[in-house]
Amino acid sequence: MSKKIAGLFLAALCGACTVARHANAQNDAPPTISGLEMAPINFKKGEPRNPESLNSSLDGDFAVAAINRDLLIVKKYRSLRFEILGFTDTEECAPSDCQKLSASRAEAVHGWLIAHGADPSSFKRVEGLGAEMPIADNSTEEGRSVNRRVEVNQVPSRSP
């Protein structure tokens, strides 16, 4: 694990999460998290092959810490809604198979979070997006390893 990634993760863990209420003239909208960074959950190449083995599919201690931190956030802020998005790199699968692999990653994280106490209604969307939206350079192994990820993101709640 690179020192830069470890440093960013520790900074995110130490950062204060504040809840801010945004009111409009007619009603009080659900709270939103301000200053919250949820770390991506990185996977080993081609994993998970079996959704029951999520822990062995995760790419190192950083990924294990990230999924556990995401669980704490989802459980703490039960009134908020989240999406779980899975991604692949461009070389670990054929383009036609990347969507399926990324969906397997998202579903594995979703299942793990629920099995560990997250409320199923906290999640509005669980989807695999294949190799779309890379966050690092797919021409290097380091970049590809960053792109093999699942993101748990807060989504805006709509007022009735």
Image: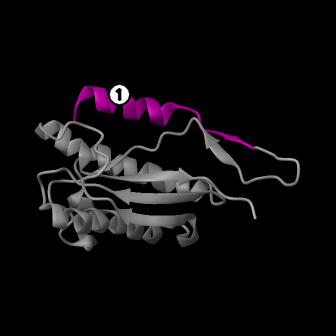
Kind of residue at badge 1: Gly
**From the viewer's perspective, is 136 left or right of 84?**
left
The quarter in which the C terminus is drawn is bottom right
21 above or below 44? above
The quarter in which the N terminus is drawn is top left
Q: Percent x, y for residue 86?
A: 33, 58
How was the colour assigned to the protein in this rendering?
Answer: one colour
Q: Percent x, y for residue 107?
A: 35, 69
Label 1: which residue? 7
- Residue at image coords 76%, 43%: 22
The foreground one among 133 and 51 is 133
**From the viewer's perspective, is 120 left or right of 30?**
left
User: Can residue 82 be seen from the camera position used here?
Assistant: yes
Q: Is residue 8 magenta?
A: yes
60 above or below 158? above
Quadrant housing residue 75? bottom right
67 above or below 107? above
Q: Is residue 115 magenta?
A: no
Q: Which residues are magenta?
A: 1-21
Q: Percent x, y for residue 115?
A: 43, 71
**From the viewer's perspective, is 21 left or right of 124?**
right
Q: Residues within 10 Å of mark 1 (few under 14, many from 20)?
A: few
